[in-house]
Amino acid sequence: MTRAADATPRDWFRAWFGDEYLAIYPHRDIEEARRAVQLYLDRVPPPPGSVLDLACGAGRHLRELLAAGVRAAGLDLSITLLERAREGSPKAQLVRGDMRRLPFDDGSFAGLTSFFTSFGYFATRDQDRVAATEMRRVLRPGGSFMLDFLNADRVRRELVPSESGRIRGYDVSVARKIKDDTVVKTITLNADEGDEVRRYEERVRLYEAGQLAQLLSEVGLETQLRFGDYEGAEFDSSSARLILAGVAA
C-alpha cells in the first residue's frame, strides 16, 4: 500500500522534515558548515549582539556559530530537527516557529543566517516575500545577513530526473522535475517488502541571483556581496551555490 505524505504540496515541509528525513540523510558535512559560517564571520561579521540561524534544522551551522564564540539562537518548524539540534547544542536557545511569523521582537538580532537552501519553500512568491520581510523585521538596522541558496542556472542545466538506491534500511527512489519556476522532488520510501510505502515531496522556487537580490532589497535587506561557494569565490552561472550577503537598511 502506498501512502502519500500527510501534508498537501502547499505545506509539504510540515510532513517531510522528520524521522524519515533524518534516516535517509543521517548526517551532513560538518566541515562544509564550518566553512559556511566562517565565510559569514569573515566577510559580513555582525555587530555586537545575537545572531539568528533561521531554519537551523539539526543545528550543524548553529554549532559552528557557537563554537566561534557567537551568541546565536536557532529557529526551525520541525520538532524532530530541533530535538537533534538540542542533542548537539544542549545550552543553545532553540525556538520552534514559522519563518513567516517569527516569534521575536523587532530588531532582536545583530545578524541572521539562512544556510543550505532554506528559502523558497512556500506556495507563492508573496509568501516568500513575507518570510523575507520577517527576516528584515527581526534584524536591527546595520545588522548583517547571509542567505545561502541554490544556483538556479546550474539546477536547470544539471537536474537529474531520477535515481534510486538503498539507504539505511530504506529502498529510496527520487524523481525530479521543474514545473513552472519550481523544482519538485518526489521521494518514495519503502522499508521492507510488504510494508507501507511512503511518498513525500519537496518544492523549492528557483530565483535568479538578480531576482533574489531584488526581493531582499525591496524589504530592506541590501545585498553587498555575492559568492558562488563557501570559499568565497565570485558567483557566476556555473557556481555551486548562490550566497547573498549584506546588511539591513
Image: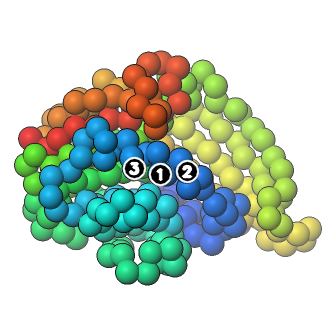
**Which residue is located at x 71 percent, y 33 percent?**
161
| x and y percentages locating residue 152 in the rendered image | 48, 28
Q: Which residue is mark 2?
A: 31
Disc 1, disc 3: CB below 8 Å? yes
**Which residue is located at x 39 percent, y 47 percent?**
38
Q: How many marks?
A: 3
The three-letter amino acid code for the residue at tag 2 is: Glu
Instruction: Calculate the distance from the C-alpha at mark 2 to the C-alpha at mark 3.
Output: 10 Å
Residue 206 in view here? no
The three-letter amino acid code for the residue at tag 3 is: Val
Question: Which secondary structure, mark 2?
Answer: helix
User: Which callout, 2 or 3, points at the residue further toward the start of the chain?
Assistant: 2
Left or right side of 176 for 241: left
Instruction: Calculate the distance from the C-alpha at mark 2 to the C-alpha at mark 1.
Output: 5 Å
- Residue toward you, 203 or 85: 85
| x and y percentages locating residue 167 in the rendered image | 80, 59
Q: Is residue 80 above or below residue 223?
A: below
Left or right side of 203 for 53: left
Left or right side of 62 for 192: right
- Residue toward you, 182 or 171: 171
Disc 2, disc 1: CB below 8 Å? yes
**Which residue is located at x 37 percent, y 81 percent?**
91
Instruction: Calculate the distance from the C-alpha at mark 1 to the C-alpha at mark 3.
Output: 5 Å
Q: Where residue 37 is drawn, which disc sits there? A: 3
Residue 37 in view here? yes
Q: Where residue 34 is drawn, which disc sits there? A: 1
Q: Is residue 147 above or below residue 217?
A: below
Q: Residues within 10 Å of mark 1 (few under 14, many from 20)?
A: some
